Amino acid sequence: MVELKNVSVTYDNGVSALKDVSLKINDGEFVFFVGKNGAGKSTLIKLLIRDVKADERADLVPVVRVNGFDLMKMKQREVPKLRQTIGFVFQDYKLIGNMNVYDNIAFVLRSIDAPTRYIRKRVPQVIGLMGLQKKAKCFPNELSGGEQQRVAIARALVNNPQLIIADEPTGNLDPRTSEEIVRILHEINERGTTVLMVTHQLELVKDFGGRVVKISGGVIDCDDHV
Ligand code: ADP
């Protein structure tokens, strides 16, 4: 669950990127975040992973809760634990070029010292879920954009996150592949994972519908089901 109350974020240079934002996202929701460049979408995401902190206020205490963690009280050394409950999907995939598909995904579990037996079971599971069985030994440059994004989604899923944050995941893809990626994210959502997807592509939002949160100038100016 994501809960924000009275959250403002001001950068060191004085830019006020979020202004008194309150927002609640329940477990199991699928939410589109939309808004123009500079609206505050990235800042909102950075807030959820404790990359930026909410401003301290004298008058009232802001609330920032994500997946059971209280980010206002969290110590820096606890941040990795929070991030392990979140899977990320980026516009440019961010796959490791000199690792094959299997290793790109296994890397996540290896880096948290998961047992080898578990890695050998879990990685093929998510590869299968994304329909990438025949591509497990391929390197990223041998894959199409859509396939690379499916690898990135498998990587985001492998550690069973409670929440997936997808930041413009279809920004580099053609309309048909974009639809396929959003459909996959919806299927993941139907299996119980909360999904937040940032997008510029309003036609995708219209096609799929659901909850849409629009951010403008650091405030939420619309939060509706379309
Ligand atoms: P979006 O993701 O919607 O494009 P951002 O959250 O990146 O919006 O930016 C919101 C505002 O904060 C913009 O005015 C931007 O210039 C400013 N901003 C973003 N990151 C920083 C930073 N690290 N330092 C100072 N200002 C920033």
Image (tube, rainbow, N blue to C red):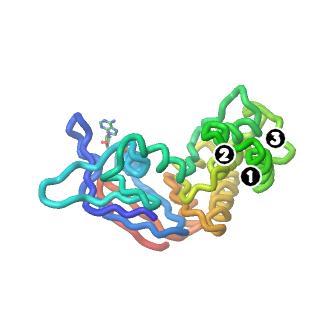
Q: Position of residue 168 (x, y in %)?
A: 53, 48
Q: Position of residue 149 (x, y in %)?
A: 67, 45
Amino acid tagged 3 = Ala
Q: Give the mark, 1 or 2, whose residue is nearer the N terminus.
A: 1
In this rendering, the answer to whether 104 lies above or below 73 is above
**Disc 2 crowd, CA 10 A, few/some/many (<14, 14-19, 20+):** many
Q: Nearer the viewer, residue 63 or 77?
A: 77
Q: Is residue 103 left or right of residue 211?
A: right
Secondary structure of residue under mark 2: helix
Quarter of the figure with residue 171: top right
Q: Residue at x 31, y 64 (%)?
A: 22
Q: Nearer the viewer, residue 78 or 151?
A: 78
Amino acid tagged 2 = Arg
**Circle 1/circle 2 CB separation < 8 Å:** yes
Q: Which mark is residue 126?
A: 1
Cα gap from disc 3 to disc 2, whole angstroms: 12 Å
Q: Which mark is residue 136?
A: 3
Q: Give the mark, 3 or 1, whose residue is nearer the N terminus.
A: 1
**Circle 3/circle 2 CB separation < 8 Å:** no
Name the residue beneath numbered marker 2. Answer: 155
Secondary structure of residue under mark 3: loop
Q: What is the residue that sits farthest to the top in this orientation? A: 98
Q: What is the residue that sits farthest to the right in this orientation? A: 134
Pointer 1 residue Cβ closer than 8 Å to ligand 1 = no
